[in-house]
Amino acid sequence: MQKALKGRRAFDRKGNVRLGALSLAFFGGLVFLWPALFQIPGLFSGEKAAGALPAVVKVDDGDTVRLSDGTVVRYLGIDTPELAHDGSRPEPFAKAAARENARLVLDKKVRLQTGARLRDPYGRLLAMMYLPDGLCVNGELLDKGLAWCLWFPGDGPAAEDLLPRQRAAMKKGTGVWKGLKERKGAYIGNARTRRFHAAGCPLGKKTARENRVPFASAWEAFWAGHAPCAECLGEWPGR
């Protein structure tokens, strides 16, 4: 019994030495490889590599697509003119936005990057969309004046980077910015929500004093990265 115990203890001690060496080698290798791990798409950023994603099989409009696995993706950080629905007429540039979206992504593999806000009230996945060559589809639509920035808390840093692209399109007078219609009177902006309202809008009047931002024109509000209140101004800038 004593001999058996000695053998067992000797085995435990030897095993512990081996385990410690293995642990040291493992953690040493991990430290060495740590920087490279951050180069793997999607490992830490909520992003999925293009090869792991199905193709875009249908384009619903300028900012919504469907993947072959049934996922419906709504582009993060932007909004586009509405197509016809419920008997209404399509908003200006709605068809152009849908056509450009289809040209960019239909039947192509893409990679997605999500923020903290994963889904909209309709259950659609919210994401920045990139082609395999790195082209940002959200930004491309802004470049052509076929979209405007639509920010929500939790959208992530990629959405924050879209405003300069909108401003460049505004300077050029491209797409929707060429036909932007101004209404008489000032606007009330909300710094917390990044929405702007007509002066008489009940929602605008409820904006806390510390969050109020006065805008003399819709152009000024858009330039600041605010989007129009859907209740009082409609969703399209030139409506």
Image (cartoon, rainbow, N blue to C red):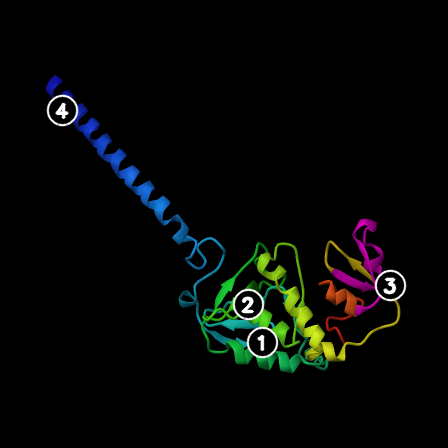
In this rendering, is residue 148 above or below 34? Answer: below
Residue on which disc 1 sits: 60
Which sits earlier in the primary sequence, circle 1 or circle 3?
1
Alpha-carbon distance for marks 3 and 2? 34 Å
Residue mark closest to the camera, 4 vs 1: 4
In this rendering, is residue 145 above or below 2? Answer: below
Q: Secondary structure at mark 3?
A: loop
The picture quadrant where one finds residue 189 is: bottom right
Instruction: Check if residue 207 falls in the magenta segment.
Output: yes
- Magenta span covers which residues? 195-218
| Residue type at numbered disc 3 | Ala
The residue at the point 67 percent across, 61 percent down is 151
In this rendering, is residue 198 above or below 210? Answer: below
Tell me the tag on residue 199: 3
The residue at the point 62 percent across, 78 percent down is 97
Residue on which disc 4 sits: 7
Which sits earlier in the primary sequence, circle 4 or circle 2?
4
In this picture, residue 45 sits left or right of residue 221: left
Residue on which disc 2 sits: 73
| Residue type at numbered disc 1 | Asp
